[in-house]
Image (cartoon, rainbow, N blue to C red):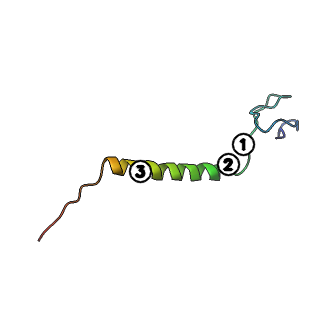
Amino acid sequence: MKCLKCGWSNSDTAAYCTKCHAYLSEQPGMESIDAIKALILSLFFTGIFYLVFPIPVIRSEY
């Protein structure tokens, strides 16, 4: 990953530039992956919550 400040080529796992110590930004497109992960986790935990605390069924007979 290239540093936006000095143009130095760093490893892909680096968080800071080894030459100028500037913060390296995330790769573009990570926001959509994070949103998909959040959606899957929220659906999973909502399902678990419903299994542990089910909504009571109330019958109205007229």
Residue at point 52% right, 53% down?
39
Residue 40 picture location, percent across and down: 52, 52
User: Decide: marks 3, 2 in contact (CB < 8 A)?
Assistant: no
The residue identified by callout 3 is 46
Task: Give the residue type that dot 1 points to.
Answer: Glu
For the residue carrying disc 3, how many other residues have a C-alpha within 10 Å: few (<14), some (14-19), or many (20+)? Answer: few
Q: Residue at x 87, y 37 (%)?
A: 9
Above or below: residue 53 compared with residue 22: below
Residue 23, by quadrant, is top right
Instruction: Quickly name the residue at label 2.
Output: 30
Q: Residues within 10 Å of mark 2 (few under 14, many from 20)?
A: few
Q: Is residue 49 left or right of residue 13?
A: left
Q: Position of residue 36 (x, y in %)?
A: 58, 53
Residue marked by disc 1: 26
How many marks do you count on the picture? 3
- Choose the circle earlier in sequence order: 3 or 2: 2
CA gap, disc 1 to disc 3?
A: 30 Å
Q: Are marks 1 and 2 in contact (CB under 8 Å)?
A: yes
Three-letter code for the amino acid on which mark 3 is drawn: Thr
**Residue at 72%, 42% in the rendered image:** 26
SS label for mark 1: loop
- Image quarter of residue 2: top right
Q: Secondary structure at mark 2?
A: helix
- Quadrant in the picture for the C terminus: bottom left
Question: Looking at numbered disc 2 in the image, what kind of residue is underneath it?
Answer: Met
Q: Nearer the viewer, residue 58 or 19?
A: 58
Q: CA separation, marks 1 and 2?
A: 7 Å
* Front of the two marks 1 and 3: 3
Residue at x 37%, y 47% (from the top left corner)? 49
Give the SS element for disc 3. Answer: helix
Q: Which mark is residue 43?
A: none
Decide if residue 46 is on the left or right side of residue 21.
left
